[in-house]
């Protein structure tokens, strides 16, 4: 230890108490902020986490990127006659898949907060109690946006051409992000019920994987056995894919979009209060 | 009677399934003092604190903190208290500075005010150099100091500290003690949960000893120590096999009951008279039980428990694990 370091260390100890006195004397309580400010502050926290742990973004985009490449070049010729035609068909589906996979991480993140103890701090603050949840999901929406953009950009590079132009693509991404926001409430509920982040991840993907595959993302439902075709028809993820496809290619109906928004509203109405309730008692 | 008490709890009960984690706890804490809750792992300390900090709803009894009911007026309680949980309640992915800005913003500081408050706090807690580092790279002591800093972004009237020095090295420990003394010196009430008798002794004006969810003794540190004798002799033998022989020798020489500690080579016994204790240690060598080390000092938590309950303090899982299992 150099002389300077020793001096610094010595200075450190006796002054700790003094410094603490000084900050205690100046810590008067500011007026309580609005619920919106609180939620946005938690959203900022979510963005900081993306900045500090960019790997989590990589995790969720690698799989869909692999799917785009694998499905297009492996199955494209067999299923659609050409890789180009198949890419045109599956890209909106993979966009939806990519963004919805990301929603599982909302549950994982929340579960991590609970197991690490930081939730205790938030719950002991005099704040609007759903703020940490709403804010976290707002931050996650940024992640959904990135996941969606990655797929669209990759698609454009590989030759995907959205007939409805940029406006259609923007509308499709917006609709998928809205649905993802609603679906993530289901995973935050899961995140509060399960005991470990890994369990949330496994269960989440166990639910989401079959649901995204048993949809109209990769094949025309008319080619399927009747029972499966029926399931694909009622699967809300198929509805999101139909609407996204319609928006990107032109020809989306108000009914298709309305159905997705209604399903998003229903998911939120069920799982947002459930999550909030569980969070209070976590 | 409730006038002026910072914490007043009567008959607090919390059940998890069939377990009564907290089984009728009464507390009365005067404002501006440090009050210690002393107990072994899983005694119900964390659960008690969580009820007082409005994180858990009591299944029975009632509590008023700073004059407000913890259930009916939870928000008013939260406005006056801060909690430093046993698991450091900070976000490991963020930097120290970001953690403090986050709390500042949530409590109503403007962006610039939150930033400057964070800088002041980091300075005061000796963390200025680590401000921009992610908390996951902090040492245990730094993390604990940041945790306490996060609790005083707005000066609380009462602060809950749940085992603030468990797992810390001696230097970090004494830093935390300095901080606690500074807090109480400025009029903040501190409720301190600890497993360490010396910590409660150093800091607390009043202590409640809890075991299996009940308060089994209450008083000043001096009163508690008096209840187990003024001092204790602790002996560690080179050869654990000689422990029974050594116990017999000590019991003869000191005329007291000898405690066999969890360590298979260790013994302890109440000993008020230093000269007599030294003679007893010398007699051990004569009897062929070689002593690795010995100390004469305050009774340990084990001894306090032995004296108060007739059974040793249970050890095993850290309190956090036990309490988390209860909570799950």
Image (cartoon, rainbow, N blue to C red):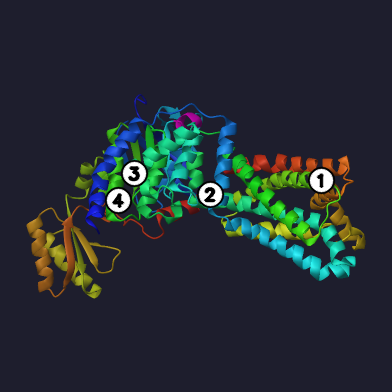
Identify the secondary structure beneath mark 4: helix
Q: Name the residue under label 4.
A: B173
Q: Read off the magenta span.
A: B74-79
Tags 3 and 2 on a common chain: no
Q: Quadrant of the C terminus of chain A?
A: top right
Other-residue count near label 2 (Cα within 10 Å), few / some / many at <14 / 14–19 / ≥20: many
Determine whether, in the image, residue A14 is placed left or right of residue B67: left
| 3D distance between C-alphas at marks 1 and 2 | 39 Å
- Say which of marks 1 and 3 sits in front: 1
Residue placed most toward the observer, B115 or B180:
B115
Determine whether, in the image, residue B184 is placed left or right of residue B116: left
Give the label on residue A114, or none.
2
Residue drawn where x is 88% and y is 67% of the image: A82
User: Are the two marked residues, 3 and 2, in contact with CB atoms closer than 8 angstroms?
Assistant: no
Q: Does residue A238 belong to the magenta stretch?
A: no
Give the label on residue B125, or none.
3
- Say which of marks 4 and 1 sits in front: 1
Q: Residue B167's spot in the image, x, y percent? A: 35, 56
Residue placed most toward the observer, A246 or B147:
A246
Reply above or below: A190 against A228. above
Q: Mark 1 points at which residue?
A: A168
- Say which of marks 4 and 3 sits in front: 3
Q: Does residue B75 belong to the magenta stretch?
A: yes
Identify the secondary structure beneath mark 3: loop
Can residue B65 be seen here?
Answer: yes
| 3D distance between C-alphas at marks 4 and 1 | 61 Å
User: Are the two marked residues, 4 and 3, in contact with CB atoms closer than 8 angstroms?
Assistant: no
User: Are the two marked residues, 1 and 2, in contact with CB atoms closer than 8 angstroms?
Assistant: no
Q: In which quarter of the image is residue B24?
A: top left
């Amino acid at each position: 230890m150099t002389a300077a370091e020793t001096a610094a260390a010595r200075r450190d100890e006796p002054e700790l108490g003094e410094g603490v006195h000084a900050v205690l004397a100046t810590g008067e309580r500011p007026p309580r902020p609005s619920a919106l400010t609180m939620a946005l502050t938690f959203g900022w926290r979510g963005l900081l986490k993306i900045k500090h742990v960019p790997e989590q973004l990589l995790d969720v985009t690698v799989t869909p990127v692999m799917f785009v490449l694998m499905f297009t070049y492996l199955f494209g010729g067999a299923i659609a006659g050409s890789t180009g035609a198949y890419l045109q068909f599956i890209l909106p589906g993979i966009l939806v898949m990519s963004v919805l996979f990301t929603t599982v991480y909302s549950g994982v993140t929340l579960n991590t907060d609970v197991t690490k103890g930081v939730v205790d701090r938030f719950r002991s603050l005099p704040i609007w109690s759903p703020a940490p949840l709403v804010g976290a999901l707002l931050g996650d929406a940024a992640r959904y946006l990135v996941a969606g953009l990655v797929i669209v950009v990759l698609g454009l590079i590989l030759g995907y051409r959205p007939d409805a132009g940029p406006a259609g693509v923007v509308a499709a991404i917006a609709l998928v992000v809205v649905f993802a926001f609603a679906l993530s409430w289901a995973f935050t509920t899961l995140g509060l019920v399960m005991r470990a982040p890994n369990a949330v991840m496994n269960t989440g993907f166990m639910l989401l994987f079959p649901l995204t595959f048993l949809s109209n993302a990769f094949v025309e439902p008319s080619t399927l056995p009747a029972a499966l075709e029926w399931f694909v028809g009622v699967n809300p993820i198929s509805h999101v894919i139909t609407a996204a496809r319609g928006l990107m290619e032109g020809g989306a109906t108000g009914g298709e979009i309305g159905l997705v928004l209604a399903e998003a509203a229903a998911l939120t109405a069920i799982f947002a209060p459930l999550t909030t309730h569980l969070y209070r008692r976590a | 009677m409730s006038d002026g008490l910072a914490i007043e709890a009567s008959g607090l009960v919390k059940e998890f399934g069939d377990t009564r984690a907290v089984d009728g706890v009464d507390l009365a804490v005067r404002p501006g003092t440090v009050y210690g809750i002393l107990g072994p792992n899983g005694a119900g300390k964390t659960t008690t604190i969580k009820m007082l900090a409005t994180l858990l709803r009591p299944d029975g009894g009632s509590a008023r903190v700073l004059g407000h009911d913890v259930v009916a007026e939870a928000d008013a309680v939260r406005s006056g208290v801060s909690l430093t949980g046993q698991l450091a309640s900070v976000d490991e992915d963020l930097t120290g500075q970001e953690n403090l800005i986050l709390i500042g913003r949530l409590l109503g500081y403007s962006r610039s005010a939150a930033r400057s408050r964070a800088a002041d706090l980091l300075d005061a807690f000796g963390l200025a150099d680590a401000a921009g580092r992610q908390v996951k790279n902090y040492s245990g002591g730094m993390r604990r100091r940041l945790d306490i800093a996060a609790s005083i972004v707005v000066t609380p009237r009462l602060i809950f500290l749940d085992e603030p020095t468990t797992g810390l090295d001696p230097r970090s420990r004494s830093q935390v003690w300095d901080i606690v003394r500074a807090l109480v010196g400025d009029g903040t009430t501190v409720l301190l949960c600890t497993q360490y008798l010396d910590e409660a002794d150093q800091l607390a004006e009043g202590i409640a000893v809890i075991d299996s969810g009940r308060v089994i003794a209450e008083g000043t540190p001096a009163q508690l120590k008096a209840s187990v004798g003024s001092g204790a002799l602790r002996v560690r033998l080179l050869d654990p096999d000689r422990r029974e022989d050594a116990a017999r020798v000590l019991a003869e020489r000191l005329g007291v009951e000898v405690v066999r500690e969890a360590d298979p080579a260790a013994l302890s016994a109440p000993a008020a008279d230093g000269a007599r204790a030294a003679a007893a240690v010398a007699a051990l060598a004569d009897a062929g039980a070689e002593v690795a080390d010995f100390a004469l000092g305050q009774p340990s938590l084990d001894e306090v428990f032995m004296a108060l309950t007739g059974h040793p303090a249970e050890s095993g899982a850290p309190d956090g694990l036990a309490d988390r299992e209860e909570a799950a």
